[in-house]
Amino acid sequence: MDPAPAQSRPRPTGLIGSLVALVSALADFFESRAALLATESKTALVQFLVAAICLVAATLFFAFGYIFLLATAVVAIAHLAHVSWLWVALAAAGLHFVIALIFLLVAGTGIKRPIFRGTLEELKKDREWLRDLETNHPRN
């Protein structure tokens, strides 16, 4: 059995009717805010996952760069005459450091982007509406 649409149901009057209407309005308000929060939470999760993956990747590339730098120093000391090994290892270390820097920059820009933008805008509108309500209908 389908419930009657809100428009066709008889509305109780008096104090009980006002309380029912208030509870219904509050329920609708919190339901809409919860839905908005859920939607934006998914977006925030994706942002944080991307930042976390970039930080892990940056750490790995930094470690590889450090290993290549150490290998370069060892090989350079051991084989001063074999310059080609030194330059190849140094180029690999430099490449890894550049890649690590790129991942760190991507993670940094992902974190700086504001999250929950829609929720904050809706809450700001709600505060303004409440301020206007208080201005137009001051309490005695």
Image: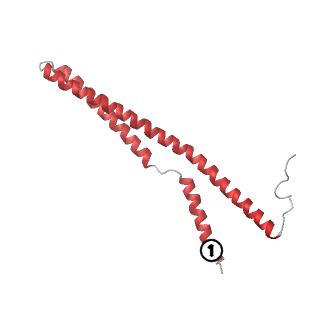
Answer left or right for 13 relative to 140.
Answer: right
- The part of the image, by quadrant, that contains residue 110 is top left
Instruction: Classify residue 67 by image quadrant.
Output: top left
Number of residue marks: 1
Residue 39 horizontal/vertical position (percent): 60, 46
* Residue under the image location 49 percent in, 42 percent down: 47
- In this view, 136 is above or below 123: below
As drawn, the residue found furthest toward the bottom would be 140
Q: Is residue 41 left or right of residue 23?
A: left
Q: Position of residue 115 (x, y in %)?
A: 50, 50
Residue 131 in the image, given as x and y percentages of width and height: 59, 71
Mark 1: few/some/many CA within 10 Å (<14, 14-19, 20+): few
Quadrant where the image shows the C terminus = bottom right
How did the renderer colour the structure?
A: secondary structure
Amino acid on which disc 1 is placed: Glu
Q: Residue at x 84, y 50 (%)?
A: 3
Task: Identify the residue at image location x=39%, y=44%.
Answer: 108
**In the displayed structure, would residue 8 be above or below residue 35?**
below
Direction left: furthest residue: 81
Side of 101 relative to 127 (left or right): left
The residue indicated by pointer 1 is 134
Callout 1: helix, strand or loop?
helix
